[in-house]
Amino acid sequence: MSDDLAALKTETEAALVEAADLRAWDAVRVAVLGRNGKLTALLKDLGKTAPEQRRERGAALNVLKDALTQAIEARRADLEAAALEARLAAERLDPSLPPRPRPTGLIHPISRTMEEIAAIFGAMGFAIAEGPDVESDWHNFGALNIPAHHPARADHDTFYLPAQGNEPPRVLRTHTSPVQARAMLTRELPFRVIAVGRTYRADHDATHSPMFHQCEGLVLDRDITLGHLKGCLIDFLRAFFGIAELPVRFRSSYFPFTEPSMEVDIGWDRRSGELGKGSDWLEILGSGMVHPRVLANCGIDPRAWQGFAFGMGVERIAMLKHGVPDLRPFYESDIRWLRHYGFNPLAPTMLHEGV
Ligand code: 2NL
């Protein structure tokens, strides 16, 4: 091997020993094998070598290139192994350490209230019925004895969807009643269902949100009476508020889908806001015996079957139970409010309390 090649070999091997980390190693590699590297330059100069020496010089350059490539790769393997050793020595795991505290989410009071409602009625043998948020005008109004131009429609501030050709109009359901209408159309009698979920009305102020939640219940059988309605709702209200002797009052009222209709009040003290105390009454839900026309609309013979229905606002009973003073923060996702009013996801619901 000619002197210049032997010198490059010695020089490169020394530089590799010098290179203490992968960055320095890469600089050596580029300086020798890179596009402007020393060995690359020698290979490029091969053309200028006198023809009679070119073969021998070319062979020697190839041998050198193989040797240097191998030396460079070997150094890289050593450096990588050393780097791994250093990391293993520096990064120690202590499996006896306690886990880092992680912020857990909380259950939104509306979700929690709906779960509690479902748990209480579930224990009374009710099934959960579901339906779409976007409803036909008929399921939302017609089936429930609220025909077009009926004054009750004016109370509902309905969101109408853009009409699609000749399709009948569609709405965002203004109450959960269409879910019950669907239950009557599809379920086998007798049945007991509740429908809990989102409802929508074009109404927005301090006490109304355009999206809110309702729970409705429906019990149909051959001989259901007003007595069943009263017993069921008294049991529910006492279980929900956790007050065994909560006073409950039934007051005659009007809904287009029930006859007779009754509003339900609970006893409270208006001044302190305490439930079950004092001598004031607070309206809490609406109810009644399902109107025979509603049964007939949904394909049920009103001479063979009858029952009761009721409805309530989820926000309202959640606010009363937990002392939430304002409706609006329910939908504002303010983390401070959620931390204050949210529920531990691992805590059991209050099913154990007297149901
Ligand atoms: C209220 C009053 C009520 C119903 C809802 C109902 C549903 C069908 C048939 C008959 Cl399918 N009735 N629902 C009955 C009485 C009252 O809601 O104040 N809700 C917030």
Image (cartoon, rainbow, N blue to C red):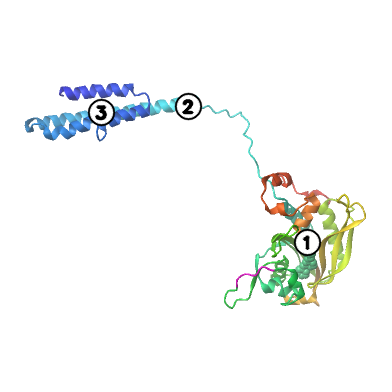
Front residue of this view, candidates 233 and 31? 31
| Mark 3, residue position | 68
- Is 127 displayed left or right of 38 in the figure? right
Q: Is residue 185 left or right of residue 96?
A: right
Task: Give the main secondary structure of the magenta stretch.
Answer: loop
* Circle 1: residue type: Met
Amino acid type of disc 3?
Leu
Which of the two discs, 3 and 2, labels the residue nearer the N terminus? 3
Q: Quadrant of ligand 1?
A: bottom right
Q: Where is residue 77 in the image (x, y as percent from the top left)?
A: 35, 29
Label 2 – label 1 distance at C-alpha? 63 Å
Quarter of the image with the N terminus is top left
Q: In which quarter of the image is residue 346?
A: top right
Residue 29, x across and y down, in percent: 29, 30
Q: Earlier in the sequence, mark 2 or mark 1?
A: 2
In the picture as drawn, the residue positioned furthest to the front comes out as 205
Which region shows up in magenta? Answer: 158-162
